[in-house]
């Protein structure tokens, strides 16, 4: 429900409505869609938005008859779809967050990588971003019996850093962990029948060598995406140096951001950092900062120890946690 409430609280100025109508809504101090009709963000009436209630809300607005008709038509098409509203809530309840095998890092993410959420990882080379991406992609395939998502993962490799050997190493450690924590008879049978090959088969790796390949792949995913998570490592690679026309770059990034939000699944992407004006800056620019729901900055502090700092979060205070990256994968510090 948290995602749904955030999703519908959109700016009035972003709605595809006539400029004159938007101007009237702003003049009436109706800055968000939820200001137009209080029924939308609360998802009342057993999760369905009542068309009669929306019509009553629109009739109360001081708008011309033609503008009321346009607004009412928009709200009916986008906010009164029972199959959409109830379907989103049901799907969110059925799909658990993807854990990282580090309780500290999971807590920073409010439980893990959530469904329909864009998570951005940023850091210098060697900061652990690729390792975390490997772990998230692997953990997406964990059976539902162990509170996993049990869905395929797509790993889009833009840097050429994905490693089948590392995936297998993490997979063997994850399988051993599942067999160790299995308690019920069903869990023990599931863990016994599960193999590393089964986990790795559900991870698809796609190499993209330039931004045109990346954009084409995302376009295909927008048509149909049955993956539990889409990982892009690293998005900044093809948008950092390949453009002389910065306006084109900005437009393409805006289109890409819109499409990533439309995938209807978890998205994890990696951004790079650079030094600018004496401060640390992320490479994709200020306009891109509105795309991810969460932004985590990773840093290596010692051979196995890493810190993760939350730079942006919709539901958690920004803080810093420590975790380690061992041969087994992402883990907490030993107690």
Image (tube, rainbow, N blue to C red):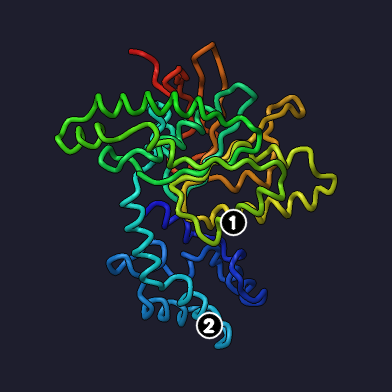
Identify which residue is drawn at 49% across, 15% down: 305
Q: Tell which circle, 2 or 1, labels the residue nearer the N-terminal end.
A: 2
Residue 237, position in %: x, y?
70, 37
Q: Quadrant of residue 185?
A: top left
Q: Quarter of the image for the N terminus: give it.
A: bottom left
Q: Is residue 194 left or right of residue 134?
A: left
Residue hosting label 2: 68
Q: Is residue 261 left or right of residue 324?
A: right
Q: Is residue 5 above or below residue 203?
A: below
Q: Quarter of the image for the C terminus: give it.
A: top left
Element type at mark 1: helix
Residue hosting label 1: 259
Q: How many numbered dots are placed on residues in this image? A: 2
Element type at mark 2: helix
Mark 2 is surrounded, within 10 Å at the Cα level, by few (under 14), some (14 to 19) or many (20 or more) other residues, namely some
Q: Front-most of 222 and 63? A: 222
Residue 120, position in %: x, y?
56, 39
Identify which residue is drawn at 37% across, 23% down: 173
Mark 1 is surrounded, within 10 Å at the Cα level, by few (under 14), some (14 to 19) or many (20 or more) other residues, namely some
Extreme-right residue of the structure: 244
Identify which residue is drawn at 68% across, 50% down: 253
Residue 282, position in %: x, y?
67, 34
Residue 274, position in %: x, y?
71, 29
In the picture, the disc for residue 294 is none
Q: Front-most of 57 and 96? A: 96
Identify which residue is drawn at 24% across, 31% down: 192
Q: Is residue 34 left or right of residue 287?
A: left
Front: mark 2 or 1: 1
Measured in 3D between alpha carbons, the distance from the residue under mark 2 to the one under mark 1, in whole angstroms, is 30 Å
């Amino acid at each position: 429900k948290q995602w749904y409430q955030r999703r519908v609280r959109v700016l009035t100025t972003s709605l595809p409505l006539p400029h004159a109508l938007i101007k009237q809504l702003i003049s009436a101090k109706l800055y968000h869609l939820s200001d137009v009709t209080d029924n939308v963000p609360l998802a009342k009436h057993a999760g369905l938005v009542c068309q009669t209630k929306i019509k009553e809300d629109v009739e109360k607005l001081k708008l011309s008859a033609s503008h009321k008709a346009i607004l009412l038509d928009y709200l009916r098409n986008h906010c009164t779809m029972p199959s959409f509203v109830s379907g989103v809530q049901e799907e969110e309840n059925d799909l658990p967050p993807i854990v990282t095998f580090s309780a500290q890092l999971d807590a920073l993410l409010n439980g893990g990588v959530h469904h329909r959420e864009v998570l951005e990882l940023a850091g210098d080379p060697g900061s652990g971003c690729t390792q975390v991406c490997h772990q998230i992609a692997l953990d997406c395939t964990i059976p539902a019996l162990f509170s996993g998502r049990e869905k395929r993962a797509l790993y889009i490799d833009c840097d050429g850093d994905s490693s089948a050997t590392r995936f297998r190493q993490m997979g063997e450690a994850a399988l051993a962990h599942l067999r160790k924590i299995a308690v019920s008879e069903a869990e023990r049978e599931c863990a016994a029948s599960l193999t590393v090959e089964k986990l790795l088969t559900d991870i698809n790796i796609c190499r993209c060598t330039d931004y045109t390949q990346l954009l084409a792949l995302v376009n295909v995913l927008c048509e149909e995406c049955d993956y539990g998570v889409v990982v892009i490592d690293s998005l900044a690679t093809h948008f950092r140096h390949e453009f002389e026309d910065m306006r084109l770059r900005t437009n393409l990034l805006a289109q890409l951001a819109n499409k990533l939000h439309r995938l209807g699944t978890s998205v994890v992407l990696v951004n790079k950092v650079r030094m600018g004006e004496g401060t640390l800056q992320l490479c994709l620019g200020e306009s891109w900062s509105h795309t991810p729901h969460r932004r985590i900055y990773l840093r290596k502090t010692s051979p196995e120890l890493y810190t993760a700092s939350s730079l942006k979060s919709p539901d958690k205070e920004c803080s810093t946690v420590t975790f380690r990256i061992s041969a087994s994968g992402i883990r907490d510090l030993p107690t």
